[in-house]
Each structure stands twice: as C-alpha cells, then as structure tokens.
Amino acid sequence: MHNRTPMLAALALSSLLLTSCAGTAASVGVAPAPASDATSQPAAHSGHHDGGTSSPRATADGPSDAAKMVCGDQPMDRLTAILRLEEDPHTVNTWADSTFTCTYHLAAGALEISVKEAAGQAAAMKYFDAMQALAKDARPIQGIANLGFPAYETADGTAVFQKDNFVLQVDASGLPATLGPDAITRNALAYQLSTTILACWVEHH
C-alpha cells in the first residue's frame, strides 16, 4: 500500500460512514451447484473464488443473505457511480464449494466478487492464508486501510479481506489498468467495492 494508504483509508472510512445497506440481495437467484467442504484449499490463482462475513450461516441449499450482498444494491450502486455507468451491468451468480460468486459483465471486461463461507473464523483464516500464499505479487493491506481485518491486494487488481467466517475477494484483474472517466485504477476499484461490502456486513452484524 505504502503512499496510497492515507487515500484508501479515507475512502474506506467514507464508505463505512455513508453506505446504507437497506435492500440487500436476499432475492438474488443462485445457480445451484454441489457444495463441498468449506475448508477446502483454494486453487493457485492470482485472485478468484472466496468471501467473508458473519451470520446468518450458509446452508447446503445456498449462501447466506450476507454473502448475497456482493450481488446486491450497494456494490452495484457504488460500481455504477464510480464508473458513471448509464445502466446497471448484467450480473451472473453461482454457488459452489461454499463460495458465492457474482460476476459483473462490464463493457471493459468481467469483474468478479466472491465470498467463501467457511465453517468458522479459524477455517476462514486458514483459507485466507492459503490464498495469500498462492497469490502472485500479494501485498498486505496494512494500517487503517484494512479496517482491522486481515487483507491483501495483488498487482493485477484483486483485493481480499477476511472477516468472521468469510473471505471476501473482489477480482478486477479482467479489467483494464484504469477505468471510467476518472481513470480509476482497477486496484482502487477493487478496494472501494470491498469496503462497501464490509460496511454492509458491519451494519448487519
């Protein structure tokens, strides 16, 4: 993070203070897939598949309401505001291996936000550590910018946070290095969307 920490910290605090989480994604349709052991190890990748949260718990039938927030109004509104989109992008979501994934199809490419729902906080931390070890060019997000949660980012535009039994991942690696009329970097976009979702989780904890 280095010299970007003050800016990101300010953005994070603004998100926590201003984000309203009324109207979550409780009605989001989920493409069914067999769920497996929530403590399974992540596949080697620079950034994909994972999430973070609290109650209510996921079940074998699908993700928790908290996990569904990654495909809800708040990240969608934040995304459209940051990029000044004229309409909401199309989304597709899936539930597999205890991971809820929401893919936002933008004109510039795909943005993937996912939440791994582990059996408990210790299992989530173990999964987070494994992800960080496998991630290419992972850098810890430190100080006030991580909001008190274990977090890291990668050079290609992925931000990962661990909270409670969740591991949240915002993967913007499929997007250009900068986006929108303000030329926001994909790393900054991933971070801002992460803090928006974390704010919702804190509010609904």
Image (cartoon, grey):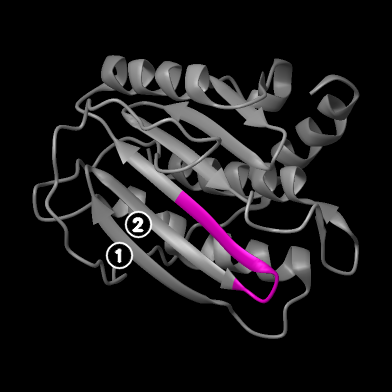
Position of residue 52 relative to residue 113, above or below, is: above
Residue range corresponding to the magenta coloring: 106-113
Q: Nearer the viewer, residue 139 or 69?
A: 139
- Seen at 53% across and 39% down, the residue is 47
Q: Quadrant of the C terminus?
A: top left
Position of residue 162 relative to residue 182, above or below, is: above
> SS for tag 2?
helix
- In the displayed structure image, the side of residue 166 where residue 74 appears, left or right: right
Task: Judge whether residue 17 can be spotted in this image.
Answer: no
- Seen at 61% across and 25% down, the residue is 152
Q: Position of residue 28 (x, y in %)?
A: 32, 70
Q: Position of residue 145 (x, y in %)?
A: 71, 26
Q: Is residue 110 magenta?
A: yes
Q: How many marks?
A: 2
Determine contact: label 1, label 2, CB under 8 Å: yes
Q: Quadrant of the N terminus?
A: top right
- Seen at 47% across and 63% down, the residue is 103
Q: Position of residue 96 (x, y in %)?
A: 23, 50
- Seen at 23% across and 67% down, the residue is 31
Q: Earlier in the sequence, mark 1 or mark 2?
A: 1
Q: Amino acid at mark 2?
A: Lys
> SS for tag 1?
loop
Image disc number at residue 26: 1
Dot 2 crowding, Cα within 10 Å, few <14, some 14–19, many 20+? many
Reading the image, the residue beneath label 2 is 68
Which-is-in-front pick, marks 1 and 2? 2
Dot 1 crowding, Cα within 10 Å, few <14, some 14–19, many 20+? some
Splitting the image into 4 quarters, where does residue 98 fall?
top left
Image disc number at residue 192: none
Query: How many angstroms separate mark 1 from mark 2 (CA)?
Result: 6 Å
Q: Position of residue 125 (x, y in %)?
A: 37, 17
- In the displayed structure image, the side of residue 14 where residue 3 appears, left or right: right
